[in-house]
């Protein structure tokens, strides 16, 4: 009898709790929230461009001695291709990834033409590059932040200034709202190996 009483009490407790929980669920009003996610626009980099850049890094940019000492984790790069001079051919920005190419002042970046020839080797680059629609010397002006100041990198004599830290502060307070942003942290660019 005692076992039956305990079983009945347990059954009633479960039923009471179940009813109460159902009541709680019914009292909660559904909330509809729309979350929009925008995938950053990035140009698809064709495999022949990746291969061309990788070959340039291994065969022209780095020496055999460099290749022997660079750890495999530092043999990586990101790409962004855009036409800087209006000739209909994309120039290629290459951001070298890893401690071998980065120091306390920033990282090494390359700018190559469509034939994988070096235009500029940028040193101590930090953060994003802003490609302005404005041109000087028939090439787009690049804006970068260096040592807390905006710098305008203007193409002249076949290249852009390689070290933004020695360029005078820009007359502009910031990039224009029409600049194309390259190597922004929000961009999910692929990382390639060489």
Image (spheres, rainbow, N blue to C red):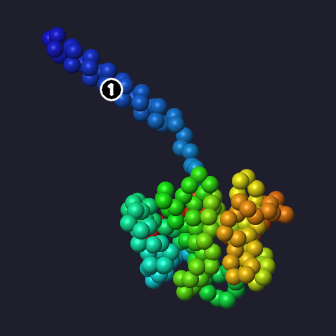
Place residue 158 in its image quadrant: bottom right
Place residue 83 in its image quadrant: bottom right
Q: How many marks?
A: 1
For numbered disc 1, what is the local secondary structure? helix
* Looking at the image, residue 191 lies above or below residue 133: above
Q: Nearer the viewer, residue 6 or 101?
A: 101
Toward the bottom, the furthest residue is 87
Q: Is residue 87 visible?
A: yes
Toward the front, the furthest residue is 65
> Pointer 1: what residue?
15
* Looking at the image, residue 20 lies above or below residue 154: above
Q: Position of residue 128 (x, y in %)?
A: 64, 62
Q: Is residue 41 visible?
A: no
Q: Position of residue 138 (x, y in %)?
A: 76, 84
Task: Tell me what residue is drawn at x 53 percent, y 44 percent.
Answer: 30
* Looking at the image, residue 43 lies above or below residue 6: below
Q: Nearer the viewer, residue 5 or 148?
A: 148
């Amino acid at each position: 009898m005692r076992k039956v009483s305990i079983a009945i009490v347990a059954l009633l407790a479960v039923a009471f709790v179940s009813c109460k929980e159902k009541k709680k669920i019914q009292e909660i009003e559904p909330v509809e929230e729309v979350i929009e996610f925008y995938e950053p626009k990035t140009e698809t980099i064709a495999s022949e461009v990746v291969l061309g850049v990788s070959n340039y890094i291994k065969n022209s940019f780095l020496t055999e001695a460099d290749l022997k000492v660079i750890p495999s984790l530092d043999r990586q790069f990101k790409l962004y291709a855009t036409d800087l001079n209006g000739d209909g051919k994309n120039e290629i920005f290459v951001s070298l990834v890893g401690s071998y190419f980065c120091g306390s002042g920033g990282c090494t970046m390359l700018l190559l033409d469509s034939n994988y020839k070096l235009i500029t080797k940028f040193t101590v680059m930090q953060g994003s590059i802003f490609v302005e629609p404005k041109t000087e010397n028939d090439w787009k002006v690049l804006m970068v932040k260096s040592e807390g100041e905006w710098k305008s990198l203007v193409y002249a004599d076949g290249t852009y200034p390689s070290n933004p830290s020695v360029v005078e502060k820009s007359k502009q307070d910031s990039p224009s709202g029409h600049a194309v942003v390259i190597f922004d942290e929000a961009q999910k660019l692929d990382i390639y190996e060489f």
